[in-house]
Image (cartoon, rainbow, N blue to C red):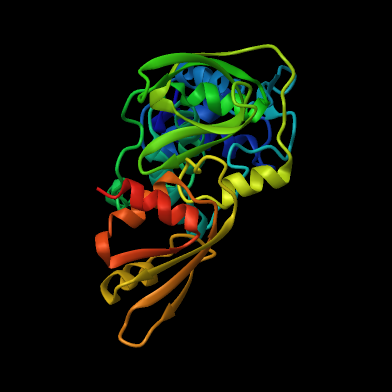
Amino acid sequence: MPINKSAYRRYKVIDSCLRNKMKKYPTMQELVEAIQEKLDISTTPNTVEKDLKAMKLPAPDGFDAPINYDSSKRGYEYLDPDFSISGVSLNSYDIDAIKEAIEIISSIGGSRVSEKFSHAVEKMLSSVQEDLPKSDRERKIIQSESISSGRGFEHFDLFFSACRERIPVNFAHYSYTNRTFKSTTIHPIILKEFENRWYVIGYSELHNSLRTFGFDRIYSPLTIRKEFIDTPNKIKEEYLNDVYGVYPLRDGKKEMIIIHTSPLISNYFRSHKVHESQEIDIQEGGDAIITFNLVPSMELVRLFLSYGNQLVVKQPKRLVAFIEKNRD
């Protein structure tokens, strides 16, 4: 559970007392008086005793504080004289960067990963946000669509752990086209979000190749005990880095893609690159010839089709034919 902010303020005072080299071995009464004086609140020895125990708890519930009571000195000490619950020094730029990260990662709220992250960061930042106005601490300045909605997102934690620990996963995969289920075992390597949908990518035993599976079509996933089958780095890099979207066309390979756009549509491509390989050559009159070095994908096809007759695919021939077949 997240640490109560009022309790954390008391922990900071206790921490300061235990680290005070000029006044070693503070007694219980001295800790109580220090808290009352510095925080201008009323407290009791019973509360401080609970605080000491809480500080000694292992992370994430406590700080693993090496607190010891020396009966001969009748006071408390840190067994490690260099220990502090505020062991990380953060400047204002660090704090701003972390706050931005919190807002961004909250877009996958609902997963155990995001909850653990938020808990850890809250504990870290609580020590440096005491002097900030409450409005500045809580004001939200980033708005994004939630990507935790939709069926299948409950599998995020399982696949995240499977990717990290290199553990195969078996599941039933539903085909929207055939309306049937097939048992599939995947050796996952990465999770990918595209247009507010989550996918897992990995070696599929069923297809004997790298494949992408949408969370929304995965049912009853279970990790299984068997040797993990890795994929050569070259194949992984091409599949992950040279594809716009998530579903490469069958037997697709990285190749030069050339399109011709109207002046209006060329503005969209100039303002937002589809891929890092994109290059634009503006023609006389404002039309543009745009090239990509990519593996053709279903998402790229849909993007091109969305511009209607203001975008024409020139090559490769196979992609030209595929687009014409799927136009209207």
Give the side of residue 121 with respect to residue 42, left or right. Answer: right
Position of residue 179 relative to residue 91, above or below, is: above
Position of residue 92 relative to residue 10, above or below, is: below
Q: Is residue 130 visible?
A: no
Location of the N terminus by quadrant is: top left
Question: What percent of the width, then of the height, locates residue 29?
Answer: 53, 24
Q: Quadrant of residue 265?
A: bottom left
Name the one closer to the observer, 268 or 103: 268
Question: What percent of the width, then of the height, locates residue 136?
Answer: 31, 52
Please report the residue visible at 33 percent of the width from the left and 46 percent of the height from the top. 326
Q: Is residue 311 visible?
A: yes
Looking at the image, which residue sits at the far bottom?
A: 284
Question: What percent of the width, then of the height, locates residue 306?
Answer: 28, 54
Q: How many marks?
A: 0
Question: What percent of the width, then of the height, locates residue 6?
Answer: 39, 31
Q: Quadrant of residue 307?
A: bottom left
Name the one closer to the observer, 35 or 255: 255
Please report the residue visible at 54 percent of the width from the left and 65 percent of the height from the top. 277
Name the one closer to the observer, 2 or 97: 97
Position of residue 254 relative to residue 80, above or below, is: below
Please report the residue visible at 38 percent of the width from the left and 45 percent of the height from the top. 103
